Image: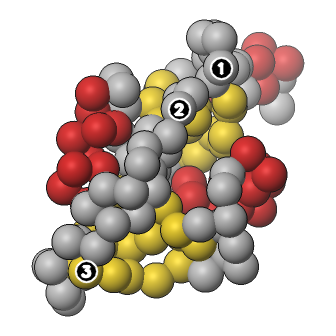
Amino acid sequence: MSAAFVAAKFAFPKLAKGEVWICGLVGIDDKVTHTILLPGESKNLNHQAAMAWAKKQGGDLPDRVEQAVMFRDHRKIFQQHAYWSNTTHAYFSGDAWYQNFYDGLQSNWRKDYKLLARAVRRVML
């Protein structure tokens, strides 16, 4: 691998104040999508309100893979609480997935239940 290839594949996006780089995930097209945690946190919101809150922050809720990385590498910047993901359950459309930052559990819960949320933005480089 050339240094230019490595630099191109592993370039980091610029971060605004309060943002935290979470990870870079390589897709099947070999493009790297960087996940950046935005500052701020929601209060207890149902899933629909959490999705709207994240959009108002200029982002999206993280997906399950991003949340697993957040728990592994960044759990200290989260409350020991459950946070919504952007992912609806495949078989139970009234449920969405969440990440518990107390014990690492990922599971699904009714979308009308109130959990916390953090927003992310994604940058493809």
Confirm or deny contact between disc 3 and disc 1 (CB under 8 A).
no
Residue at 42%, 48% (x, y): give it: 43
Depth check, front residue: 74 or 80: 80
Residue type at mark 3: give it.
Arg
Residue 119's image quarter? top left
Q: Which label is found at residue 18?
A: 1
Q: Secondary structure at mark 3?
A: strand
Depth check, front residue: 5 or 17: 17
Q: Secondary structure at mark 2?
A: loop
Confirm or deny contact between disc 1 and disc 2 (CB under 8 A).
yes
Depth check, front residue: 48 or 24: 48
Q: Residue under circle 2?
A: 40
- Name above or below for residue 64 compared with residue 78: below
Q: Sequence order check: which comes first, mark 1 or mark 2?
A: 1
Residue at 30%, 50% (x, y): give it: 50
Residue type at mark 1: give it.
Gly
**Could you say where residue 20 lies in the image, as x and y percent from the top left?**
68, 30
Q: Residue under circle 3?
A: 110
Q: Sequence order check: which comes first, mark 2 or mark 3?
A: 2
77 sits to left or right of 95:
right
What is the spatial separation of the Cα atoms under label 2 and label 3, in whole angstroms?
Answer: 24 Å
What is the spatial separation of the Cα atoms under label 3 and label 1, in whole angstroms?
Answer: 31 Å
**Could you say where residue 69 lies in the image, as x and y percent from the top left?**
67, 57
